[in-house]
Structure formats: structure tokens, C-alpha cells
Amino acid sequence: MTRIGIAGISGRMGQMLAEEVAAAAVLVGGIDRPGVDAKGAKLFADIVALAAACDLVIDFTHASTVGLHAKALAAAGVAWVLGTTGLSPEDEAAVAEAGTKIPVIAAPNYSAGVNLMFALAERLGAALPANAYDAEILEMHHRQKVDAPSGTALGIGRAVAAGRGVALEDVKVSGRDGETGARKDGEIGFAALRGGQIVGSHIVSFTAANEQISLSHHAFDRRTFAAGAVRAALWLRDRPPGRYTMKDVLGI
């Protein structure tokens, strides 16, 4: 069976991942900050030690660790399922470089429903002209979330932009405030809300003069992300080096 380690094993996601991995594969253990409680799982000294014991690492940690983890896992030849969001261009480059040596999935969200939403958002972006249908994305998360817009919201935006044949960075507008002027054709707008303990809600709307169509996804339990990440890990294990997506895993 596939031997899986977890980076960030003591966090809320890490603990759920440990349970899901233990039910489907071999849980080797994980890494986390010193002094944390791993709930009985083996804690390794660092990512290098964990990689030496694994076939694959599932990584839900922090963007600051991405460069280090990319180098360590590529050097060890260990597959990588990355769920960390808020990546910088340098982080993205590190992930891409790792993908030349090992199989990698780096996704902003591992829910099957969200990834189907990405696919539908891209199709709607392609079908609905940007000069007639205004695309707006609204997301809400728990009050502890530190990045905005969420990685999932940005993933939806990238899907819409891909459907329209443009780069998201060229049309993205976030957090309008004050005298912003009229909305420009082709913009993809983002609004981020924070409060309580909402796991994650995302809505993308395409609004024209005479109609509106919206897609929405609401996560009720983080376990949907953990289950999806383990599904991705089992699919990825024996793939050749490359950068894969949840579209590949789901066959969409």
C-alpha cells in the first residue's frame, strides 16, 4: 500500500487527513511545529526525514514552507499533493520545478464539487461574452483565515479568465472601495467576507442587462477537502513526473 506522510499533521486539516489516510493507505506520520500534539502519529524531525520514509507527502502547511518542501521532495523522488494557498510567483516557480522531477498536484481546493465548479466556470466564461456578462466572485470564510481572496476564489477567477482567453492578473479587481468609477468591460471582480467558523462558501455570478446565472458551492465540513486530497494522492502515486490537476483526478 502507498506510504503517505502529512506535512502539518497536527492542525485541523492535518488530523482529518491522518484519519482519511489511515483508512485508505499507510499513514507513516508527519511533521509540524515543535511541541505539538500529533494525536499518536509519528512525528519526524523535518521534511527530509519524512520524505525518506514515504512514497508521497500531502502538504497543507504555509506558503513559507513551499520552496523548502519542493526541493526536499524532488530530491527524494517523493510525490507531492499540495493544498497550501497564498503562493507567491517564486513559490509557483518552485512547484513547477519540482514537477519536472516528481508527480505533483497543487490545487487550491480538493473538493470534488469545487473542481466541477472550476470546470463549469471556465465553460461559462467561454460562452458568455465579457463585454455583456459581468463576472463577480464572492467568498466567505471563517474569521481565522489570513489570505484574501481565498485560493478557491482565485481558482474560480482563473477558470473564468481561461474561458475568456485572458490572464486573471490583467482583469482582476478586488475589494472595491470609495469612488472607483464605472465597472469596465471584462473585469473579474472579487469580494471577500470573514466571520464565525464558516468552512467555505463561493459564488460566481455572470450578470448581463437582462439575465444572471450563478454557480455556488458551500462546504459544511473540512473533511470533504481531506477526502479529496487522499483521493488525489492515491491517483497520483504511480504517475510519471509532471504537474497534474484535480481535473485529471476526476476525469473532467
Image (cartoon, rainbow, N blue to C red):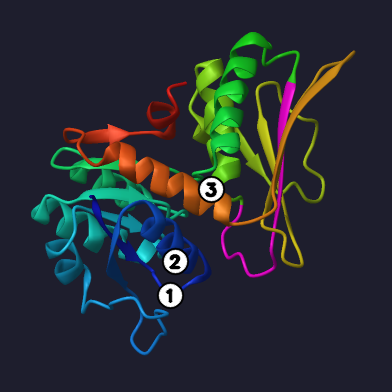
User: Tag 1, which secondary structure?
Assistant: loop
| Left or right relative to 130: residue 52 | left
Q: Of the residues tagged 3 and 1, which is closer to the observer?
A: 1
Question: What's drawn in magenta, residue-wise?
Answer: 134-148
Inspect the magenta stretch and tell me whether residue 120 lies in it.
no
Check contact, mark 1 vs mark 2: CB within 8 A. Answer: yes
Q: Which residue is mark 1?
A: 10
In the rendered view, tell whether residue 68 sits above or below residue 99: below
Q: CA distance from mark 3 to mark 2?
A: 18 Å
Question: Is residue 204 in view?
Answer: no
Residue 125's x, y, as percent? 62, 18
Residue name at image x 20 percent, y 67 percent: 50
Q: Amino acid at mark 2?
A: Gly
Q: Which residue is mark 2?
A: 14
Q: CA distance from mark 1 to mark 2?
A: 5 Å
Q: Earlier in the sequence, mark 3 or mark 1?
A: 1
Residue name at image x 59 percent, y 16 percent: 123
Q: Residues within 10 Å of mark 2 (few under 14, many from 20)?
A: many
Residue name at image x 32 percent, y 33 percent: 244
Q: Nearer the viewer, residue 218 or 127?
A: 218
Q: Of the residues tagged 3 and 2, which is closer to the observer?
A: 2
Q: Amino acid at mark 1?
A: Ser
Check contact, mark 3 vs mark 1: CB within 8 A. Answer: no
Residue 14's x, y, as percent? 44, 66
Instruction: Find residue 4 and report its image quarter.
Output: bottom left
User: Tag 2, which secondary structure?
Assistant: helix
Inspect the magenta stretch and tell me whether residue 141 lies in it.
yes
Instruction: Find residue 215 and report its image quarter.
Output: top right
Residue 151, which numbered label? 3
User: Tag 3, which secondary structure?
Assistant: helix
| Left or right relative to 34: residue 17 | right
